[in-house]
Image: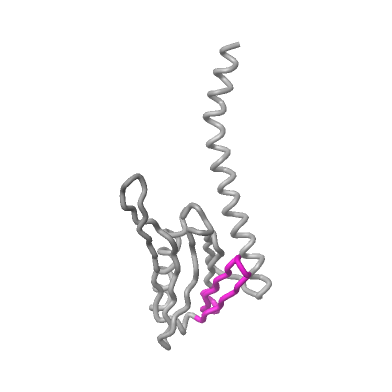
Amino acid sequence: MSNIILNVIIIAVIFLPMAYFMLSGNKEKSSTKFLQDKLKLFHVIPDTIGCFQSGGIALDKGKSELYFYQYEGEVFTKIACSEIDKADVEKLYQNEIAHGHDINMLKSVSIIIKLKDKSEVKLPVYNASKYPNVGLDLLESVRWSQLINKVVSK
């Protein structure tokens, strides 16, 4: 009897993490599919897609356009790459006290698109009040700002 219980515990320890990673990969695929379906409504078939907790970003190199879809409010933003001067990542921190120590907590992340006419477009990527875990949003936003800068520098 104890061998059966031990075998069940060993199998659970091995297969539960594997199932978690397999299902989380499916979540990313479903987010990408969802974004592709939304962009098709606007007649957009992008070359590159990125997903955040707040929405998704896409680049169509053929049309030379950048797209951002924000889930909250279903806001669709389209920017011609020829209008973009550069892209930056804006990170806002807030000091908090935890266990008697001051800690800088990440509160929000946005991609700031600076246009050639000196105006800016803010693409909200992460907000701590809405999403408890930053996940890969910060890294993905840095990757996208580099990609945008590479495309507009050509």
**Picture residue at 51% right of the left edge, 81% below the top:** 80
Q: Nearer the viewer, residue 152 or 109?
A: 109
Q: Position of residue 117 (x, y in %)?
A: 42, 88
Compared across the picture, whether 98 is left or right of 8 comes to: left
Q: Is 57 a magenta residue?
A: no
The extreme right residue here reads 41
Give above or below for 107 relative to 45: above
Residue 143 position, x and y percent, is: 42, 63
Residue most extreme to the front:
100
What secondary structure predominates along the stretch shown in magenta? strand
Q: Which residues are magenta?
A: 60-80
Q: Position of residue 48 (x, y in %)?
A: 52, 66
Q: Determine the residue positioned at 40% across, 81% down.
A: 85
Q: Nearer the viewer, residue 132 or 3?
A: 132
Residue 26: give x, y in percent of width and height: 60, 49
The N terminus, quarter of image: top right
Q: Quadrant location of the C terminus?
A: bottom left
- Asked whether 62 falls inside the magenta stretch, the response is yes
Q: Tag count in the figure?
A: 0
Q: Is residue 139 above or below residue 47?
A: above
Q: Is residue 75 left or right of residue 144?
A: right
Residue at image position (62%, 70%) is 73
Q: Residue at 59% x, 54% y: name it.
A: 29
